[in-house]
Amino acid sequence: MKSFAMRFGKPLFFVSMSTVILYSMIPFITNFVSNIFLFTDYKNFSIFAFPVKRQWEAYEFLDRNTPKESVVLAKYEAANNILIASHNRVIGNNQGWGVAAGQEMYKKRDRFLSGGMKEEEARDYLSDNHIEYIYYGYQEKYKGDIRGYSFLTPVFSNADVTIYTTKILKK
């Protein structure tokens, strides 16, 4: 006759481990379900499509209403999407930049978008880089405010994005 451990050991171990895993998953699932609504606006966001509708409206505006290959300043996410969704060139992602030049570009871009440049320095930055439009969405707003620059004029706006024209004469 087999001992109890030999007879029921493996099934008992399997059942006990399954129970532990099941009970540990319950808090994970309930926390996930309750927290997902803290970060997502389901009235304007589809879990099946990205970017959101209001961002896409801004990309379409750039495609329809700006000169071909005009330069747009944006942070990383919008910069990548603008390349796909419009005919514009973009400063704001690291494509086409060497490592050192890319890091310098990020620093200047972030300084401008934080509102940390003086007016003259900001004008020079935009002019030197031939920037004609600024995409100002949620990533760009994160570190500061550019509305203090007097030379920016909004040409498109919705609840998520404002696109400014720079009205800077090129050097």
Image (cartoon, rainbow, N blue to C red):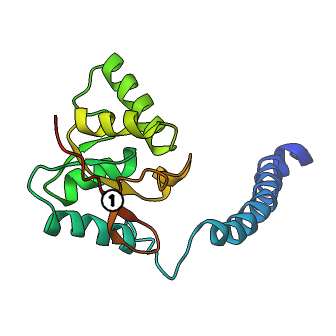
Classify 106 as above or below 164: above
For the question of whether residue 135 can be seen, the reply is yes
| Amino acid type of the residue tagged 1 in the rendering | Tyr
Quadrant housing residue 51: bottom left
Classify 123 as above or below 80: above
Q: Nearer the viewer, residue 135 or 171?
A: 171
Q: Is residue 36 left or right of residue 22?
A: left
Q: Residue furthest right?
A: 4
State the image coordinates of residue 97 (x, y, percent, origin top left).
26, 26
Q: Which residue lies furthest to the bottom in this view?
A: 43
Which residue in the structure is indicated by mark 1? 164
Q: How many marks?
A: 1
Quadrant housing residue 75: top left
State the image coordinates of residue 124 (x, y, percent, origin top left).
31, 34
Q: In this view, does 82 lie to the left or right of 142?
A: left
Q: Nearer the viewer, residue 103 or 166?
A: 166
Quadrant housing residue 49: bottom left
**Residue sitting at 39 percent across and 24 percent down?**
103
Q: Which of 56 and 36 is in front in this view?
A: 56
Classify 44 as above or below 74: below
For the question of whether residue 93 can be seen, the reply is no
Q: Is mark 1 on a helix, strand or loop?
A: strand
Q: In this view, does 148 lie to the left or right of 66?
A: right
